[in-house]
Image: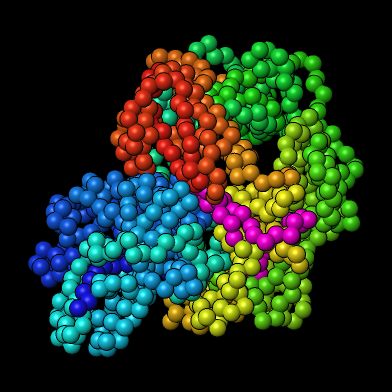
């Protein structure tokens, strides 16, 4: 007889077409039902959707309920966690996913324990690195719904393995987390059993009973009894938990699968949701980079010199960010009012994050011994040295100055802009301003040597004599450094790769076409015209300096206003643009910035880069590694025949970069906030980044790529005019050409591109360099020393992931990973400025190796894709 494990639960979207404020009212009464039903033995167990965010909100308003929740959790009746909120897995950085689980497990432990399973029942696809993340948190099982192809396996249970050997046992709820609702509402006893038995591999079956914001089913036991009466010979249904079901699985009999799961075989995946509501994607990217690569390392560096580490503050910021990274919220498939709240949360998180940054760099800089007015302190928050051109805004009394290094040698700089400011009291009449209090602010570019995780000091020496500007405006049409020569001719960009002696004509252009989709998916219109938009303008300027050359184009593209205009062949709407191309003197990167004023709707815009590579696969980075993807899905021509839920178009997610390469050439495109790409062209030699999609509804039925009912709410058209993204939009991306592809080289180049260098000038002319600069601040009681060589990573084979204090406050965690899919590498070593205790820990902070002590940490071998976290004992100043 087969045992059916009936798992009672709810799936509680934090927000969606409704806001959290609206669903919270349902939640507070729902939890009354849950608590009452468990206490009165109406039901035996209840899973609260695997996320702590809803309990966090509830207990903030009803703190008196904490004790009863703790009691039910400890009795293993109420099952909570392990997530803070159910993350997207494909466009969210690995450290964000780790922070999410870190928060969820921490809060779960405070309430008596958490569900130690990787439970993501509704994420739009499963990321390839999840098994190693789960194993890092001590999890051996995972439960999810979407993404597994029937062609990969027909089994409901299997093993999921990462390239480093990490492995979880998966219970794949192929029919959705809501399939068991039929237990309550249908008397098709055998039909339901046939459905959940299809693909089962032993005598235990899984039946989740729950749905979106679903009430407690008071009659669960009655319905179980009813089914048992009618299924007496073959099945027995019992109240159970996912953990009890997972314990029954015979792991030795399981098939092993690897990689990501993004096939729309049994459920929709929405493989073009990565470009919905670009404004949200960009804001998330800005905050992830700021928190992971700047704020957390700065707070650790500050603790080294005596500034208290504020874990609770970091948690508060991460909660705001993680709420926005839930699958619907990150995807952008929400109502406009929900997305306004998402943007508001990002704004709150951003204000706190940059204020932490500004406070810490000021506190440290003003406490350095023997600092002088006009000292500038640059902070390298990465654990390896850099030679980098940085942009600074400085204040001086004189319009003329020079920049000197610590050895007092002058450093060349490029002066971008100078403004006259005044530090006197403001006056109603401009003629009453006291010009004796005038001063100057300057934007400059300067190249600096940045020691690993340390400070660099520069000095401003003011001059009386006029200093000639290094910038020259030219009338030619060429940008050039030792790597590239870029010419603008006949409205297009032609690129010559000087290192590899290759010419690329029309190297970059904009593609525009219609979009008949919704916030879930791109869908081509029935009547479409694809426009290749060249830069048809005579309004361009070129500036060349010591450190950079830059070309700025201004113009207007003419496109159809909407789908109706496109159908009629009318190009009736002008979209103004400004396109900037920049070459740094010693860099092999080409940096681009595009600013547009979008005045059209129901369309998609992509930037396209042309290469000489005939790609068969693309390579993109993932949370802790890379992945190779076919440029054409092998099932593209037969997906309807196979009964798939949507067309498996080869539109894919990315985090920081996408690459195509062969044995002689490599093209890497790095991005800030753009999360979607496709390899296109007759010979698949072009990389297309989706800049944005402009759509009018949350969900629509009968799309070309996604036939059938609407995604989201299938019963109501929900207009989302804000998702048309009408207005000002800005995009940043960068290109690197090479004769080979190396994951670590590209990963480090991205960090150079994406991570800014915080800096602070000792001066009292401008007290509004940041919102918190106006406040007075004490210096540290014990002035800091220069902390050169605090931590220095010496490795060419692994990538830096994060540096922060451990949750248990017993040291600092430096996380690294090997991005290679198939190469075991030597991790190199970490040099420290003193001999300290260290050990290796997992993502939970649990020790994996015995303590050792040294000022040199030999990292040893990293398996393909392996993550290592080094716990450094508290470093004392």
At 55% from the left edge and 61% from the top edge, which residue is drawn? 274
Q: Is residue 168 above or below residue 308?
A: below
Res 183 visible? yes
Q: Position of residue 480 (x, y in %)?
A: 83, 39
Q: Quadrant of the C terminus?
A: top left
Count of numbered circles on the image: 0
| Quarter location, residue 475 | top right
At 81% from the left edge and 36% from the top edge, which residue is drawn? 482
Residue stretch rendered in magenta on the structure: 602-629
Q: Quadrant of the N terminus?
A: bottom left
Say whether residue 463 is left or right of residue 479. Answer: left
Say whether residue 174 is left or right of residue 658. Answer: left
Q: Nearer the viewer, residue 580 or 833?
A: 833
At 45% from the left edge and 26% from the top edge, which residue is drawn? 857
Q: Is residue 745 above or below residue 273?
A: above
Whether residue 665 appears in magenta in the rendering, the answer is no
**Which residue sits furthest top?**
370
Q: Which of 794 and 690 is in front in this view?
A: 794
Whether residue 628 appears in magenta in the rendering, the answer is yes
Res 574 visible? no
Q: Position of residue 634 (x, y in %)?
A: 60, 71
Q: Position of residue 498 (x, y in %)?
A: 83, 41
Q: Position of residue 132 (x, y in %)?
A: 41, 50
User: Which SS does the magenta portion mostly show?
Assistant: strand
The scheme the figure's colours follow is: rainbow
At 45% from the left edge and 62% from the top edge, which residue is drawn? 257
């Amino acid at each position: 007889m087969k045992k059916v494990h009936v798992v009672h639960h709810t799936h509680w979207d934090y927000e969606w077409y409704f806001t959290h404020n609206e669903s919270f009212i349902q939640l507070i009464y729902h939890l009354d039902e849950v608590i009452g039903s468990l206490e009165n033995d109406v039901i035996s167990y209840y899973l609260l959707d695997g996320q702590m965010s809803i309990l966090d909100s509830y207990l903030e308003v009803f703190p008196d309920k904490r004790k009863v929740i703790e009691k039910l959790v400890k009795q293993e009746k109420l099952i909570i966690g392990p997530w803070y909120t159910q993350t997207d897995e494909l466009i969210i950085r690995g450290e964000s996913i780790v922070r999410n689980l870190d928060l969820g497990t921490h809060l779960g432990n405070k309430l008596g324990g958490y569900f130690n399973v990787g439970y993501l029942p509704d994420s739009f696809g499963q990321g390839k690195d999840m098994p190693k993340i789960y194993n890092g948190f001590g999890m051996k099982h995972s439960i999810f719904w979407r993404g597994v192809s029937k062609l990969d396996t027909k089994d409901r249970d299997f093993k999921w393995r990462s390239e480093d050997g990490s492995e979880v046992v998966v219970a794949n709820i192929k029919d959705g987390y809501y399939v068991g609702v039929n237990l309550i509402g249908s008397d098709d006893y055998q039909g339901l059993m046939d459905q959940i038995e299809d693909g089962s591999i032993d005598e235990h079956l899984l039946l989740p009973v729950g749905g979106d914001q679903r009430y407690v089913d008071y009659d669960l036991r009655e319905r179980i009894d009813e089914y048992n009466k009618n299924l007496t010979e073959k099945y027995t249904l019992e109240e159970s938990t996912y953990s009890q079901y997972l314990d029954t699985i015979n792991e030795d009999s399981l098939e092993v699968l690897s990689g990501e799961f993004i096939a729309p075989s049994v459920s929709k995946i929405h493989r073009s949701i990565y470009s919905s509501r670009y404004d949200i994607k960009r804001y998330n990217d800005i905050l992830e980079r700021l928190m992971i690569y700047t704020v957390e390392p700065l707070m650790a560096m500050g603790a080294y010199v005596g500034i208290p580490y504020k874990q609770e503050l970091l948690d508060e910021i991460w909660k705001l960010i993680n709420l926005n990274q839930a699958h619907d919220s990150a995807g952008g498939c929400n109502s406009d009012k929900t997305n306004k709240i998402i943007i508001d949360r990002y704004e709150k998180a951003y204000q706190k994050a940059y204020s932490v940054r500004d406070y810490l760099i000021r506190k440290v800089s003003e406490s350095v011994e023997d600092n002088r007015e006009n000292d500038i302190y640059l902070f390298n928050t990465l654990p390896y040295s850099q030679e980098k051109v940085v942009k600074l805004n400085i204040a001086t009394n004189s319009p003329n100055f020079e920049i000197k290094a610590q050895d007092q040698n002058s450093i060349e700089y490029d002066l971008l802009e100078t403004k006259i400011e005044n530090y006197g009291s403001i006056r109603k009449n401009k003629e009453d301003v006291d010009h004796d209090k005038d001063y100057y602010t300057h934007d400059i570019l300067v190249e600096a040597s940045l020691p690993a995780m340390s400070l660099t000091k520069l000095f401003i020496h003011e001059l009386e004599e006029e200093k000639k500007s290094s910038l020259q405006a030219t009338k030619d049409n060429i940008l050039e450094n030792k790597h590239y020569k870029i010419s603008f001719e006949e409205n297009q960009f032609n690129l010559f790769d000087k290192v590899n002696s290759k010419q690329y004509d029309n190297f970059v252009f904009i593609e525009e076409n219609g979009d008949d989709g919704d916030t879930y998916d791109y869908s081509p219109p029935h009547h479409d015209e694809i426009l290749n938009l060249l830069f048809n303008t005579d309004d361009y300027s070129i500036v060349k300096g010591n450190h950079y050359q830059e070309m700025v184009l201004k113009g207007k593209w003419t496109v159809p206003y909407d789908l109706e205009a496109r159908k009629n062949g009318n190009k009736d709407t002008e979209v103004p643009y400004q396109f900037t191309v920049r070459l740094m003197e010693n860099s092999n990167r080409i940096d681009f910035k595009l600013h547009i004023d979008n005045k059209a709707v129901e369309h998609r815009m992509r930037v396209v880069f042309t290469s000489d590579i005939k790609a068969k696969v693309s390579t993109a980075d993932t949370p802790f590694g890379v992945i190779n993807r076919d440029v054409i899905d092998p099932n593209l021509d037969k997906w309807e025949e196979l009964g798939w839920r949507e067309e498996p178009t080869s539109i894919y997610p990315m985090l920081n970069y996408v690459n195509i390469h062969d044995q002689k050439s490599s093209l890497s495109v790095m991005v800030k906030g753009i999360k979607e790409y496709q390899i296109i062209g007759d010979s698949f030699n072009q990389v297309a980044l989706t800049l944005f999609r402009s759509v009018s509804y949350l969900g629509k039925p009968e799309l070309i790529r996604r036939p059938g009912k609407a995604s989201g709410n299938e019963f109501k058209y929900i207009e989302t005019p804000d998702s048309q993204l009408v207005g000002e939009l800005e995009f940043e991306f960068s290109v690197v050409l090479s004769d080979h592809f190396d994951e670590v080289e590209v990963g480090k180049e991205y960090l150079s591109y994406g991570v800014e260098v915080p800096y602070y000038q000792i001066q009292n002319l401008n007290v509004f360099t940041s919102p918190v600069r106006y406040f007075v601040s004490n210096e540290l009681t014990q002035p800091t020393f220069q902390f050169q060589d605090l931590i220095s990573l010496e490795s060419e084979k692994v990538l830096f992931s994060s540096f922060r204090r451990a949750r248990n406050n017993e040291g600092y965690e430096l996380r690294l990973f090997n991005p290679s899919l198939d190469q075991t590498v030597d991790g190199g070593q970490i040099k420290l400025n003193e001999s300290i205790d260290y050990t290796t820990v997992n993502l939970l902070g649990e020790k994996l190796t015995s303590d050792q002590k040294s000022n040199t940490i030999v990292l040893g071998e990293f398996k393909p894709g392996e993550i290592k976290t080094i716990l450094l004992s508290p470093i004392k100043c």
